Image (cartoon, helix red, strand yellow):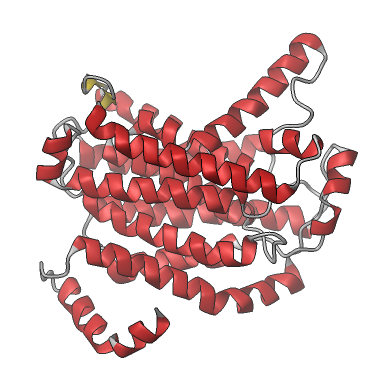
Amino acid sequence: MLVWLLQHFSTILEKFEQHISGDSRVYLTARTAIAGATSFLLCMMFGPMAIRWLQRRFRERIGSDSEHLNKLHASKSNTPTMGGLFVMGAVALATLMWGNLSNVFVICGLITTVGFGTLGAADDWIKLSTKRNGLTARTKFAIQLLLAIGICGLLCIEMWHKPRGVEVIWPIGNVGIWLGGFYVLWAIVVMVGSSNGVNLTDGLDGLASGCTIFAASAFTVLAYLAGHKTLAEYLSIPHIPGAGELAIVLGALVGAMLGFLWFNCHPAQVFMGDTGSLPIGALLGLAALVTKQEFLLVIVGGIFVVETLSVIAQVAWFKATGKRLLRCSPLHNHYLFAGEHEMKIVVRFWIASALLALIAVASLKIR
């Protein structure tokens, strides 16, 4: 891929110049693929340098409430974290290069990447440079809400005059419920919930990054279909003019996560931290909102949903009975406590994530 890029560099520059000037010959599919390749190469080229820099400054501290979990994760101590810095940087740069910056959905994607990434970085920095366990849960949630209000407000303004723009679409029968101004509240719930779901899943080497690749790939396809009038009508899904441009952001995310997984697979050389997990989840939530596939997000991001529900169930069960429902939550820790090897858990979760993504995309015509 690198050789190909070097051989065709002049052609790529010409295409980029055409894109900047609004030339329609720069196809969305080509720009999506090139955005993914760009972010992947950026991670591969600058990843080692970033990891060495992070190694000197931000090393993971293992210190959960479970002594057994601390023992299981003892080997991960001092592994550099905040790898989300170079991942989100690659996504943002690739989007700036290949995305249509006059498109509101692309702007929302960039704001989500930078905004939630900055929040995650602040949380990680406090956690690693002080004795505090990061931002307080209340402060972190409040900032997430503020970010989501701004992004979702901008999204609502853009969607207001689009057909079915501020509706919640029930997947079976394509029935919609018009929310009007309350659409902002719905959008905030989706975005913040998705952000925290990925954050909870990021606990084993390669787990969150691998699952994100499948989920983001599915939404790259969904964004393209939603923005394509003919295909949207054929599949009986809402056509959202301009939604296809969000495929550039999601394609860049897929490429960046592939590059990050190169360093994050077991044994991990770097962790993404909240710097990566918070914006990743928020971007998936944004994609679901733009494509009007919020309910499909539950299937596409099924692993993230199950991980979140496992934490909620564990807390609720313990408060009700005084006993633990799982050996340890989130769910991946339950299997880790049961003696399963870390990589076996991760690969099985990847398989489940891939199957869920395929089922979600295949369900479009079935519905």
- Left or right position of 314 against 226: right
Q: For this rendering, which residue is in front, 111 or 350?
A: 350
The quarter of the displayed image where residue 300 is located:
top left
**276 to 173, vertically: above or below:** below
- In the rendered image, the residue lying farthest to the top is 320
- The quadrant of the image that shows the C terminus is top left
- Is residue 235 shown left or right of residue 282? left
Instruction: Indicate the quadrant where residue 26 lies.
Output: bottom left
Q: Is residue 139 above or below residue 272?
A: above
**Lateral position of residue 184 relative to residue 330, left or right:** left
The picture places residue 365, in percent across and down from the top left corner, at: 22, 32
- Residue 291: x percent and y percent? 27, 40
x and y, in percent, of residue 177 in the image: 24, 19
Q: Residue 131 location, x and y as percent?
A: 83, 51
Q: Residue at image x 46%, y 68%?
A: 90
Instruction: Give 305 or 286, whichever is nearer the viewer.
Output: 305
Residue drawn 73% across the image and 36% down it: 335
The total number of labels drawn is: 0
Give me the residue at 31% from left, 71% from top. 97
User: Considering the image in quadrants, where does the N terminus appear?
Assistant: bottom left
Residue 161: tell me if it is visible.
Answer: no
